Amino acid sequence: MIRRLGAATAVVAALALAACSSAPSPAGSSMPSVVDSSAPVTITVWHGQTEDAAKAMETLAAEFTTTHPNITVKVEPGAPTTDELKQKIAAGFVADNYPDMAYAYGSWAGVLAQSGKVLDLTEWVKEPAVGWDGLPAASRATATVNGKVFAIPAIVGNLAVIYNKDLFDAAGIAYPNPDWSWNDFRATALKLTNSDKKIFGTAYSVSGNEDTTWHLWPLLWQNGGEILSADQKSAAFNSDAGVKSLEFLRAMAIDDRSMYLDQTGEKYGALFLDGRIGMQISGPWNLYDLQQRKAHYGVVQLPGTNGDHQTISGTDIWALFDHGDANRARATFDFATWLTQPEQDARWNIALGNLPLRESEKGTAAFAQFIKDYPGGDVFVDNLANAKQPRPTVAGYDEMSQQVGTAISEVLQGKGTAKEALDRAAAASADALAS
């Protein structure tokens, strides 16, 4: 979901780590209780990043080795894109050829954590040098499954509304106020829509994947609903709140015809840049393209329900995997936590067009430059406070997401009612969630 961009330079300071420390208990193996931090170690990192981001990672890995000469970090494109990386990791598990660390979407958390191949980092992240509590709460929750930490947040994001100021000006519509409601959003989308010019007020992906599903969750939460039951064992999204939320979207798509329905999920961003869509609900990963096109745009938090502007966190993670070697495990953890410290994050996230991982980075020169280079970035940073709930990290989430995505896609295209579709999705998800 998150696009990686170009690199910049900054001063890098090594993260000071103890020479010897206790090892965590990784899933599936028994490891020594003491780590020899001077032992030669080689670790492999897989990613699915763009060329510029890959080069930035390689540079950082080389710099880490200069301060940790016993550790060699091999950075490899595990797959052409992050979307394809999940299958590559799964195949690696079967062939016993998987990396020490891999970039992953947060929606994969439950599946990865249940693989029996991940490290339990719960005790290590308590070390003061890690700065675990300085990471956003929703991101920490995404990296934690059943009370055990198995990953380190890599990138944080959230959903807000990016709007085309030129289309607003042409239609004589005032720019959105941060206190706006979903009724305001709907009315604005209708005013922006011009069928003769093939301009839509907004857009929605009906590809049926996670991009379809996670756009529904903020509406669900704002209406008082939950994704899962309290014990996380059954669906709760087909409640009255869920039906109301999906029915609202259906009305925009079918009754108002103000919503462009993207069959692939790959077109609406480009159409926004071309001036064909007035508002897109998306994240900071679009800022680079907007700046490249010199787009006249604005960013505002999601519309609210009774003053609740809750959004959803778009956390991606660095998943850390177990190879039954305590020294290798600690070296991987050291690299992951070093990479996510402010000095390195200035080069891996801020300079590459993504939000800073930590609140403490807001006062840095790198962040000031980010706001200058990417207008609206400050709105996304402030909007992190509205990301109050993480997506569930249960193993069945992935299967459930597909079922919900199918339900949403059907309803927005006029096939069945919101209640029927969500009930079917809940029933189809039951076995995956219960296991």
Image (cartoon, rainbow, N blue to C red):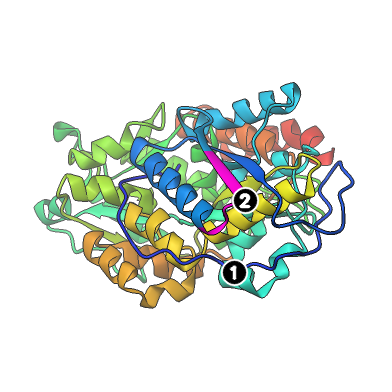
The stretch in magenta equals: 67-74
Depth order, front residue of 218/346 = 346
Find out whether residue 68 is within the magenta segment: yes
Q: CA distance from mark 2 to mark 1?
A: 15 Å
At x 84%, y 53%, the residue is: 25
Quadrant in the rendering for residue 334 = bottom right
How many residues crowd mark 1 within 10 Å: few (<14), some (14–19), many (20+)? few
Where residue 103 sits in the image (x, y, percent)? 55, 42
Where residue 98 sits in the image (x, y, percent)? 67, 31
Depth order, front residue of 74/47 = 74
> What residue occupies the far left of the structure in this picture?
170
> Considering only vertical position in the picture, is 382 above or below 221?
below
Q: Find disc 2 in the rendering and name its residue.
A: 70
Q: Residue type at mark 1?
A: Ala
Find out whether residue 148 is within the magenta segment: no
Quadrant in the rendering for residue 181 = bottom left
At x 83%, y 45%, the residue is: 27
Q: Find disc 1 in the rendering and name its residue.
A: 16
Relative placement, left or right, of 41 versus 33 is left
Circle 2 — which element?
Answer: loop
At x 61%, y 44%, the residue is: 107
> What residue occupies the far bottom of the structure in this picture?
363
In the rendered structure, which disc, 2 or 1, sits on the residue that comes first in sequence? Answer: 1
> Considering only vertical position in the picture, is 279 above or below 49?
below
Q: Quadrant of the N terminus?
A: top left
- Residue 105 appears in view: no
Whether pointer 2 and pointer 1 mark residues with C-beta atoms closer than 8 Å, the reply is no
Which is more foreground, mark 2 or mark 1? 2
Depth order, front residue of 107/16 = 16
Relative placement, left or right, of 220 versus 110 is left
Where residue 128 sits in the image (x, y, percent)? 66, 75
Q: Residue type at mark 2?
A: Asn
